[in-house]
Amino acid sequence: MNDFLPTLETPQWVIDLPKPFHNLFLGVHLWQWIGLVLLIAISRVAMVVGNRLAVRAMRVRDKLLPGEISQETHIASRRAAGLITGVLVCFPLLGPLSLPRKMERGALIVLEGMTIFAFSMLAYAMWDAVCDSMASRAAGVSDRAERLLVPMTRKFVRLVIVTIGFFVALSSLFNVNVAAVIASLGIGGIVVALAAKDSVENIFGSLTILFDMPFQIGDWVKVDKIEGIVEEINLRSTRIRTFEDTVINLPNANLIRAAVENISARRYRRQKINVRIPYDSASSAVNSLCSDIRGFLAEFEGVQSEKIIVDLSDMDDTAMTVLVQCNFEVGSQIEELEMRHKLFTEIMRLRRIHGILFYPAGISRLPDPEKKSLPG
């Protein structure tokens, strides 16, 4: 069926097309359908070109600027650049197709929506690239502020980007008065804040973590009865992996009220060992034992030599107690246990050398190995 009626705005090349190209299908001429297919193909080629250009740009960036960027950020940046290139190519090519008014308006709305989404996606990826670069630089340094600030600001700015993109889409696609919407949100914000009191407390808790910095990602912390390693700090909660390998999401509001113990922040780890010995031990042997333990700790790498205590500290009805106290300068529990093992082994070796028996609690007197019991 050919209902083609040219107008003054119809290009001459369209008028010169063979009659079959002017046949209507769903209210659109055949040549217009072919034009739409070509438009999609050109857009797809443009997306590939934009993707390749983004790859080259990211390689130049990696060579010139410090800091590493994750593979996920690379992929997101390429996809955003390709989508922007493909969408922008469609705008100048859509007009010559002379589509019906409703169809053209629908196509423009789709293109505008994709453009807003693409630029939001690009801003999202670029911010992730900045955060990845800062995080990689902060990974090997002791700047607690930067290591804690990066993950929290990453999530906050992501939320801002998504919110801005949402409001731009409302204004551009649906002609919504954004200023009026924001004003109404300001009035209703008080009601929402009162209804979401816990969420507001969690946000203030995250600000407490940000400014006070009681811990950072990777620290070993203890909050009330929860103990483990901090894996992630969000705006609402903090994720802690316990030593049983379970994950606990602790609301940040709890951090305002609770006492947070950062075990990883310890400069040293105090060791306090009570060695019980029997009263019948020779005083010279006890003095020699204490002196040798003291000498061993003084030469033990990782022990603060100025805070070593090895002396008799207590006497009760059954035995005497030698207090062995020192500080280990270690960074992990594994290193602490290894040093304790070496210390315990040395004390046992010195006990055998000086012939001093350890007196276990709850026993009034150690049995004499040389004395045999008589039959009753």
Image (cartoon, rainbow, N blue to C red):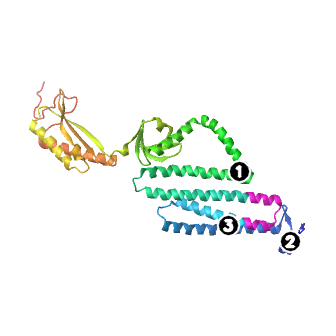
Q: Residues within 10 Å of mark 2 (few under 14, many from 20)?
A: few
Residue at image coords 19%, 40%: 310
- The amino acid marked with disc number 2 is Pro
- The amino acid marked with disc number 3 is Arg
Q: Which residue is mark 2?
A: 20
State which quarter of the image contains the N terminus: bottom right
Q: Which residue is mark 1?
A: 170
Q: Report the side of 107 relative to 203 (left or right).
A: right
Residue at image coords 49%, 46%: 233
| Residues at marks 2 and 1, CA–CA distance in whole angstroms | 42 Å
Q: Residues within 10 Å of mark 1 (few under 14, many from 20)?
A: some
- Residue 193: image location, x then y, percent: 60, 37
How many numbered tags mark residues here?
Answer: 3
Helix, strand or loop under label 2: helix
Looking at this view, is 175 or 14 the one in front? Answer: 175
The part of the chain drawn in magenta is 91-109
- Residue 10: image location, x then y, percent: 85, 70
- The amino acid marked with disc number 1 is Leu
Q: Is residue 101 magenta?
A: yes
Q: Which mark is residue 44?
A: 3
| Helix, strand or loop: magenta stretch | helix
Q: Residues within 10 Å of mark 3 (few under 14, many from 20)?
A: some
